[in-house]
Amino acid sequence: MGKEGNLTQKEYQIAVIPGDGIGPEVVREGLKVLREVATRCGFRFRSAEYDFGGERYLRTGETLPSSALEELKDMDAIYLGAVGHPRVEPGILEKGILLKIRFGLDQYINLRPVKLYPGVWTPLKDKGPEDIDFVVVRENTEGLYLGIGGFIREGGADEIAIQEMVNTRRGVERCIRYAFEYTRKRNRKKKLTLSDKANILTYTHNLWRRVFKEVGEEFPDIERECVFVDATCMWMVKNPEWFDVIVTCNMFGDIITDLGAMIQGGMGIAAGGNINPQGVSMFEPIHGSAPKYTGKNAANPLAAISAAQMMLEHLRETEGAELIEEAIKRTLSSGKIKDLSARSGLKTDEIGDMVVQFLGKIS
Ligand code: IPM
Ligand code: MN
């Protein structure tokens, strides 16, 4: 309840993890846009900032304390900038912060829209916004990411390295079910593509295929298609218009969504949500911390602003989400942003201000 006694005004608790590198700079713009939209749409949000990231790790040796994970469970959503620090060995922050939250909060879906907005350059020749508009539903808590494995005879000529791909019936089923429901709700081509490698991964991906068919029978209105992941990459480049929703395992989803980000205009615009439909979800730009641009006010904040849009969609602040998307579209088609990279010549906060200005013009 708002202090004014307005019984209908909702207030959301948002955990903000700006993180490393350009994270804080882009998150600042996302929050600026959110504040504006909140005022317009009549909701409030309170942000609780957490300093998890490389600096804190170097200072204290701590990545994400378990007590913080407990606190995050009480939030309505989490807004993340980026983690990754040049002086921290790869893997520590990724596993210690990002994966710890994804796994700890059981955010079993990684939702990544691949959408080319008008006015954005794509490296795909003769393809436009009407061709590039699909969503990848990536499994987010299992597969190769579980980190099960080890070395045998480490360091020797006979060394063996093992990394297990693990899938559970429950994990695969809830992901596939989410994807079918999402495809139905999206209500476009009503086609769900399972991207796998069932010809080689004859155990885990055989399970994916069986569950896909089984669950699919409950969704007769949704067309089903299985495409090997290598062919998926090929079609994403050659005929991206064929896709509506793609569901895939954790590792393949990681890889194909970077390809997806490139065809939608690059890391300057790609956003994703780590979703626990029954719990607390986390929204982030897909790009990393881009250390060389730290503090330069050069990174494009549109991916972080898009992540904020996804967060509102998730919180069912539909009007606010639509407003942000419309403002992003107008910003992009204004012709003022020649390039979505950090070398656009525009400042991070200038782009944030542009989005806010366009917001103000939407009636
Ligand atoms: C992503 C990132 C992460 C992943 C890394 C940072 C662990 O690449 O969100 O796609 O592999 O999931
Ligand atoms: Mn990735």
Image (cartoon, rainbow, N blue to C red):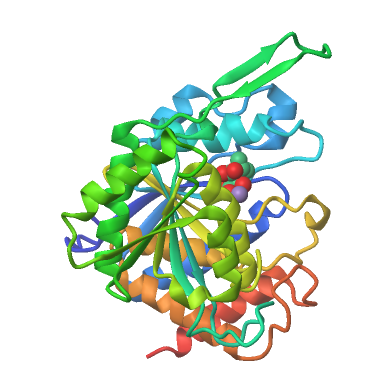
Q: Is residue 239 above or below residue 14?
A: below
Question: Given the current orientation, which residue lies at the most extreme front position?
Answer: 199
Q: Residue 123, percent across and down?
A: 69, 77
Closer-to-camera residue (271/64): 271
Q: Going by the image, does 2 lie left or right of 232?
A: left
150 vs 191, left or right, is right
| Image spot of residue 113 (x, y percent) | 47, 65
**How many labels sit on residues?**
0
| Screen quadrant of the N terminus | bottom left
Nearer to the camera, 266 or 93:
266
Which residue is at 68% across, 88% downward?
336
Horizontal and vertical percent position of residue 309: 44, 66
Residue 297 visible? The answer is yes
Q: Residue at x 54, y 77 (%)?
A: 116
Q: Quadrant of residue 108?
A: top left
Name the residue furthest top. Answer: 153
Residue 199 place in picture, x, y as percent: 48, 44
> Which of the 4 image quadrants contains residue 323?
bottom left
Q: Quadrant of residue 222?
A: bottom left
Q: Would you place residue 157 above or below residue 195 in this image?
A: above
Q: For residue 285, say whether it is visible.
A: no
Q: Quadrant of the C terminus?
A: bottom left
Residue drawn at (66%, 91%) of the image: 335
